[in-house]
Image (cartoon, rainbow, N blue to C red):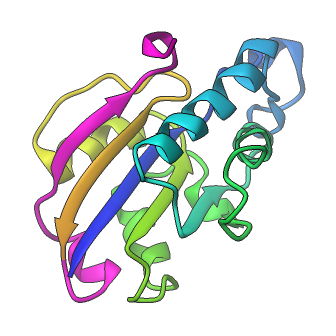
Amino acid sequence: MQRRLILMRHAQSAHRSLQGSDHERTLTTRGAHDAPRVAQRLTNLGWAPQRALSSDASRTRETWEAMTTILTGCPPPHFTRSLYLAGLEEIWTESHSVDSDIETLLVLGHNPGWEEALFTLSGERRSMTPANAALMTGDGEDWATALRGRWALSQLIRPEDLA
């Protein structure tokens, strides 16, 4: 089965020195503005996710909340500490909870793990700045199998490229 993975980094957040721990960092005004714009582009391209997995950090939660003004049909994500500052292995582990009939999955998290996951899956080195979303296609009978295979990077959505 063909699968579509949206590997998205959280939107721009405040610096750690301004707010408690790294886990508690919140979005800036720009981040709150960029997240729904990326969601609108996903919708326009026909890439609205059917399911989402996300880090449980404040900035990823807020990114998702800002996106829900556009992504009205996707159920709330599974927020988990295991995707906080994680990488492909943690995405793979969490993918076991995704039903095999889900075609489009959004995984929301952090760098440097997301850049490394993008490279490992697609073989392409790309910078994943805040609110970037890598749209990838792959194949597999279920998500865990698909995430062990090779993926093609279809597009990289960057807020600064959106009108």
The residue at the point 10 percent across, 42 percent down is: 123
| Closer to the camera in the image, 21 or 129 | 129
Front-lying residue, 3 or 126 = 3
Residue at image position (40%, 44%) is 45
Where residue 24 sits, quadrant-wise, is top right
Query: Is 61 placed above or below 126 here?
Result: below
Residue 112 drawn above or below residue 122 = above
Q: Is 8 in front, or is 80?
A: 8
- Left or right of 113 in this view: 141: left
On screen, residue 4 versus residue 104, left or right, reads: left
Q: Return the x and y of residue 163 as percentages of the image width and height.
A: 52, 11
Residue 151 drawn in magenta: yes
Q: Which residues are magenta?
A: 140-163
Q: Residue 80, percent across and down?
A: 68, 65
Drawn side of residue 155 relative to residue 51, left or right: left
Residue under the image location 49 percent in, 10 percent down: 160
The number of discs equals: 0
Look at the picture and state if 61 lies above or below 138: above
Q: Tell me residue 146's x, y (percent).
A: 22, 74
Residue 85 appears in the figure: yes
Nearest the viewer among 73 and 3 is: 73
For residue 13, say whether it is visible: no
Q: Is residue 86 left or right of residue 35?
A: left
Q: Please name the residue shown 42% across and 52% down the image.
A: 46
> Where's the N terminus, which quadrant?
bottom left
On the image, the x and y values in percent for residue 23 come to: 76, 40
